[in-house]
Image (cartoon, helix red, strand yellow):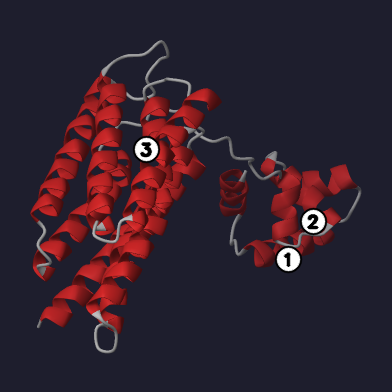
Amino acid sequence: MLVYVIIAVFVLCSAITSGSIVLVSQLKSSYKSPFFSSLLFFLVFYFTFGYYGIWGQMILESLLNSFAGEEVISRLSEVMGLLGTPFLLVASLMYVKYARDLSGRRTTNLFIAFYLLLNLSVIIIPGYIGFSNPDLEIRLLIRYYLIALSTLFSILGTYYFLIPGKGTPLLPYRDLAPLAAVVPGLIILQNLILLAYDKHILLALLFILIYFLTGGLSPVYLKYQANLSKLNPTEKALPSFDQFCEMYKVSPREKEIIHEICRGLTNQEIADRLFISLQTVKDHTHRIYFKTDCSSRSQLIRKVNESL
């Protein structure tokens, strides 16, 4: 029964991951706003840590449990978790940048460098101390680092969402407030579970589920709840009349006739204008209808207008 629960949680996490990335990719292609790029990078690194640093440890322990000692498994798991922390570090930076972008703030290279150096030192120092002291559990250090880093970026995100900066926020306050409240709430919940974790598998699965739900919250909220009408839509190049004719493999002469039909000329007027016979116009028109899957002038004109 427990195996099915683990599989169900893993499938659900995979669905949250793929759905979130698809939603943000759609929003990114529809709007010019740079915060969608920051959010997309956040999701990629956040979920990468989720699979590598969290799910990876569980899978490693289950695979090695039958033929490796507990100390070996523990050390490999610690190494895997430690190597995964840079993904979480970059994810936290991208979340902070995403919050700053949304609030209208400009994120400088100096800010990024300071943030990364500060957090990298927090990773390197405990890692060195842990490997130098065999009696010290690196797993606990990683756990506390995860708690500290997630708390840090959620607090910074909340601050940037709620406290106006010099720039103009890209979304109104009423749309930023829910993000400022719910994400830290989920972070607090997952951190409480992490503090209480005692190698109970169901507690671990609950933590993992909340971790992935935290990442998937922003894309769903922005897609289905936030008012994005003030954002600048991406300018999409409209197809030209030439592209319409090319798409339906219309010949140069048929192209001229379509143009005259759209101007409202009759068959006789088209024949007189193009110096061809009335029957030739009718033959061309018949072939045009066949190529464009139309049955009347009005349908052809409507199809041309809808395509441009």
Query: Residue 250, image x and y in percent?
Result: 77, 59
Q: Using a 10 Å C-alpha cutoff, classify the residue at mark 1 as few (fewer than 14 neighbours), some (14 to 19) or many (20 or more).
A: some
Mark 3 vs mark 2, CA separation in Å: 55 Å
* Quadrant placement of the N terminus: bottom left
Q: Nearer the viewer, mark 3 or mark 2?
A: 3
> Label 1 is placed on what type of residue?
Arg
Residue at 26% in and 81% down: 69
Q: Quadrant of residue 249?
A: bottom right
Question: Which residue sits at x=54%, y=36%?
Answer: 234
Can see residue 23? no
49 w.r.t. 113: above or below: below
Give the vertical position of 99 relative to 69 (above or below). Answer: above
Alpha carbons under labels 2 and 1: distance apart: 8 Å
Sort mark 3 into few (<14), some (14-19) or many (20+) by Cα contacts within 10 Å. many
Q: Amino acid at mark 2?
A: Glu
| C-beta proximity under 8 Å, tags 2 and 1 | yes
304 or 243, nearer to the observer: 243
Q: Disc 3 designates what residue?
A: 95
Task: Name the element at disc 2.
Answer: helix
Task: Report which residue position mark 1 lands on.
Answer: 287
